[in-house]
Image (spheres, grey):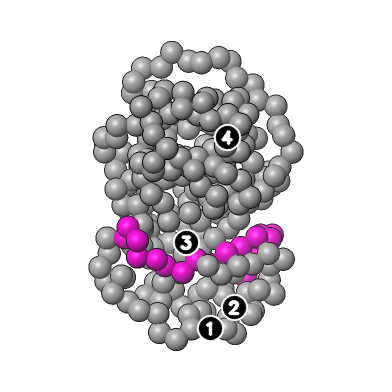
């Protein structure tokens, strides 16, 4: 039984679209969404909406500051199953506004589209947190999403400095383009750490995103909760990072800009 206590803690409108849902599939156990955790109630993961947050197991990257490293391997066992969680969501109709799929990297799971459609058919709005590493699956489910939180790690040519995976910035460019062209509500956000970023790089990234047409951007200061990188956790922010001048320049680039 799924309780209303978080099974996995986390760091955190478009027009209605018709949902074509062919009926519940009779899926083998290995053909259902692989779930790594659940936060039953959240008011922060989809702005303005009370949501259930579903953590999908698996991520192709190994970001230095990852705060959910237990979600990286696809092979990790979880007591949570999608059929049980689907039934739990049925009982939450009218109590929750939305379902948020995050990870790990939810787009890594081939069963995400089916889970999204099932949750959408229940009447929930659907939000997605993604690093943008799988542009083709993202494009497939964009018509059914109401909001996207897209993590932009750093400048696209420097992604390996954060993710430890060569050329990992290339698919993110495509994901960003697909998202912006879709018209889905979104936020782009970058988690920053003084050992991994500097003012010049942050400003260059902001200018690059503004050139793509990004309107909504957030900088998120690194928080140590969940991170297993002791070196990053040991680093203290010295003075103001980024500088007030850098933040002022970035604020001029976007109609909607916040620092967390």
Residue at horizontal 32%, vertical 77%? 235
Residue 166 in the image: state x and y as whole percent.
37, 57
Residue at horizontal 33%, vertical 23%? 30
Helix, strand or loop status at disc 4: loop
Instruction: Quote the CA–CA distance across marks 1 and 2.
Output: 6 Å
Helix, strand or loop status at disc 2: helix
Residue at horizontal 52%, vertical 25%? 90
Helix, strand or loop status at disc 3: loop
Q: Which residues are magenta?
A: 207-227
Contact between marks 3 and 4 (CB within 8 A): the answer is no
Instruction: Quote the CA–CA distance across marks 4 and 1.
Output: 42 Å
Contact between marks 3 and 2 (CB within 8 A): the answer is no
Residue 59 in the image: state x and y as whole percent.
37, 46
Label 4 Cα neighbours within 10 Å, binned few <14 / some 14-19 / many ≥20: few
- Give the quarter of the figure containing the N terminus: top left
Which circle's residue, 4 or 1, is located before the other in the chain?
4
Residue 89 in the image: state x and y as whole percent.
50, 29
Say above or below: 64 vs 41: below
Label 3 Cα neighbours within 10 Å, binned few <14 / some 14-19 / many ≥20: many
Q: Which residue is denoted by mark 4 in the rendering?
A: 95
Instruction: Quote the CA–CA distance across marks 4 and 2.
Output: 39 Å
Q: Which residue is denoted by mark 3 in the rendering?
A: 153
Which circle's residue, 3 or 4, is located before the other in the chain?
4
Label 2 Cα neighbours within 10 Å, binned few <14 / some 14-19 / many ≥20: some
Instruction: Quote the CA–CA distance across marks 3 and 2.
Output: 17 Å
Q: Which residue is denoted by mark 2 in the rendering?
A: 247
Q: Which residue is denoted by mark 1 in the rendering?
A: 243
Q: Could one spot residue 177 in this view of the protein?
A: no
Tell whether 84 sits left or right of 79: right
Helix, strand or loop status at disc 1: loop
Is residue 221 shown in magenta?
yes
Q: Closer to us: mark 3 or mark 4?
A: 4
């Amino acid at each position: 039984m799924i309780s209303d206590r978080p099974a996995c803690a986390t760091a955190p409108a478009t027009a209605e679209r018709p949902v074509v849902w062919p009926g519940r599939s009779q899926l083998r156990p290995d053909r259902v969404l692989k779930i790594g955790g659940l936060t039953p109630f959240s008011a922060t993961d989809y702005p303005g909406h009370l949501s259930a947050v579903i953590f999908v197991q698996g991520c192709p990257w190994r970001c230095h500051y990852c705060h959910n490293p237990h979600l990286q391997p696809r092979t990790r066992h979880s007591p949570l199953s999608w059929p049980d969680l689907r039934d739990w969501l049925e009982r939450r109709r009218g109590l929750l506004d939305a379902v948020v799929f995050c990870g790990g990297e939810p787009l890594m799971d081939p069963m995400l589209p089916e889970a999204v459609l099932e949750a959408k058919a229940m009447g929930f709005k659907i939000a997605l947190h993604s690093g943008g590493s799988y542009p083709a699956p993202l494009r497939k489910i964009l018509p059914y999403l109401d909001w996207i939180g897209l993590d932009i790690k750093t400048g696209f040519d420097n992604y390996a400095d954060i993710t430890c995976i060569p050329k990992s910035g290339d698919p993110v460019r495509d994901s960003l383009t697909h998202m912006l062209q879709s018209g889905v509500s979104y936020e782009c956000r970058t988690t920053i750490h003084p050992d991994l970023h500097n003012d010049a790089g942050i400003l260059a990234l902001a200018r690059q995103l503004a050139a793509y047409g990004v309107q909504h951007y957030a900088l998120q200061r690194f928080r140590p909760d969940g991170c297993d990188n002791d070196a990053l956790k040991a680093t203290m922010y010295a003075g103001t990072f980024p500088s007030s001048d850098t933040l002022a320049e970035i604020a001029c680039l976007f109609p909607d800009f916040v620092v967390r």
